[in-house]
Image (cartoon, rainbow, N blue to C red):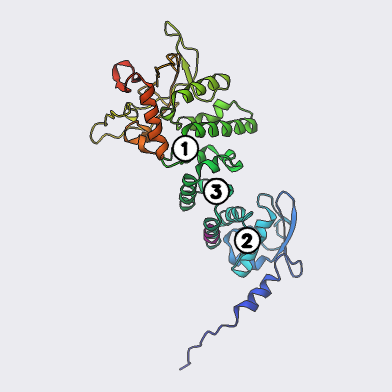
């Protein structure tokens, strides 16, 4: 009876070093890539790529000379990130850098390299800072990387003011900005958050060549105007006249409407501070879109002491998120919210109350 063999292993380091020497080495290579916007030429070995990665197996699966383009053009991946992918495929290890790790992570996701993706995620979490976090959040949202999104949101909530001043914040997509604006734990005043949202919309408007209000439409309903002080509301109204950001409906005597978008919101989503009215038991309010059909129109009408015309002529019609329902929700976003509630209470002639007979209007 034949004795079963025993697998023995040599030293891994010399083997890894030998394979690393083949990375981007034209000697013995049989496939050539042109990668990135700089069109850098990169040499590789077909058999090694094909056996390590299904993406390259499909790309390079045909016999040489039978239709595979030479060179293979990969214009969407930067050369540095592509070389990092090759390093991982050749040696099963990779040297990651702060300035390029998100590009390597993107390539790992696109090429289906799960182990490399996890290594990149671990590295990103370790080096996450104010400058990197918005870019990381964008990658997490784009590719549906839930754990990365959660880590980024936790970091942003703890460093809100610094993050809002970064270039990465201005370059976020609307889909990535929405969870940020919906957070109840941002350490920033609402007025500053509105200013940051306006700057974000201006950048998008310049890039897309569209009006600021149109760019801001997907996210503006998440701004919580009820948390603003009277002076801040007055300044916001004046700025909104000069540069429209928030959908406005101005009501003239006789019911004339001078235009603007109406945003609809179920009545259950908005109650006066200090007097929350809970929805019926078991009822869950639907999430209304600004462009959806009939829903209860919620109008914030502020009659504040000293500024009787404030937001009275131009009623800001907003979708108020559940978390800003002006009851327990006012405890959100840390101490700023409590201060704003106190300022509003001192400014109003009486506490805001829910008045269903006036089309769901808030009256002070």
Q: Residue at x 63, y 58 (%)?
A: 97
Circle nearer the viewer, 1 or 2: 1
Few, some or many residues within 10 Å of mark 2 (<14, 14–19, 20+): many
Q: Which residue is mark 3?
A: 133
Q: Tell me the element at label 1.
A: helix
Tell me how far mark 3 sits from mark 2, CA to CA. Answer: 23 Å
Tell me how far mark 3 sits from mark 1, CA to CA. Answer: 15 Å
The mark that comes first in sequence, 3 or 2, is: 2
Q: Which residue is mark 2?
A: 85
- Which one is in front, 128 or 86? 128
Few, some or many residues within 10 Å of mark 3 (<14, 14–19, 20+): many
The mark that comes first in sequence, 1 or 2, is: 2
Q: Which residue is mark 1?
A: 181
- Magenta residues span 118-122
- In the picture, measured across the screen, residue 175 lies left or right of residue 65, that is left
Instruction: Answer above or below: position of 218 versus 14.
Output: above
Residue 71 location (% of width, % of height): 74, 56
Q: Main secondary structure of the magenta part?
A: helix
Residue 329 location (% of width, % of height): 35, 35
């Amino acid at each position: 009876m034949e004795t079963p063999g025993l697998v023995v292993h040599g030293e891994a380091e010399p083997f890894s070093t030998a394979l690393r020497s083949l990375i981007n080495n034209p000697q013995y290579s049989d496939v050539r890539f042109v990668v990135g916007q700089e069109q850098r030429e990169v040499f590789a070995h077909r058999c090694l790529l094909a056996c390590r990665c299904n993406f390259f197996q499909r790309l390079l699966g045909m016999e040489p000379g039978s239709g595979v383009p030479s060179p293979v053009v990969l214009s969407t991946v930067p050369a540095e990130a592509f070389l990092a992918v090759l390093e991982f495929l050749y040696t099963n290890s990779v040297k990651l850098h702060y300035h390029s790790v998100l590009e390597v992570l993107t390539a790992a996701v696109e090429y289906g390299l799960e182990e490399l993706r996890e290594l990149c995620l671990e590295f990103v979490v370790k080096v996450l800072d104010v400058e990197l976090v918005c870019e990381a959040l964008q990658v997490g949202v784009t590719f549906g990387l839930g754990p990365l999104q959660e880590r980024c949101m936790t970091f942003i909530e703890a460093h809100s003011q610094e993050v809002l001043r970064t270039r990465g914040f201005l370059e976020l997509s609307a889909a990535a900005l929405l969870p940020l604006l919906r957070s109840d734990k941002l350490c920033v005043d609402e007025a500053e958050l509105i200013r940051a949202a306006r700057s974000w919309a201006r950048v998008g408007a310049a890039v897309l060549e569209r009006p600021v209000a149109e760019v801001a439409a997907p996210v503006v309903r998440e701004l919580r105007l009820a948390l603003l002080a009277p002076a801040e509301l007055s300044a916001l109204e004046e700025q909104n006249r000069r540069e429209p950001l928030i959908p406005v409906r101005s009501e003239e005597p006789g019911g004339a409407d001078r235009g603007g978008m109406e945003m609809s919101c179920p009545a259950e989503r908005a109650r006066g501070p200090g007097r929350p009215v809970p929805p019926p038991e078991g009822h869950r309010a639907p999430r209304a879109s600004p462009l959806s059909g009939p829903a209860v129109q919620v109008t914030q009408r502020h009659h504040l002491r000293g500024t009787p015309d404030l937001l009275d002529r131009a009623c800001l019609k907003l979708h108020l998120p559940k978390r800003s329902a002006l009851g327990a929700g006012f405890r959100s976003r840390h101490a700023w919210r409590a201060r704003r509630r106190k300022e509003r209470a001192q400014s109003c002639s009486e506490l805001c109350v829910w008045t269903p007979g006036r089309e769901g209007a808030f009256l002070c």
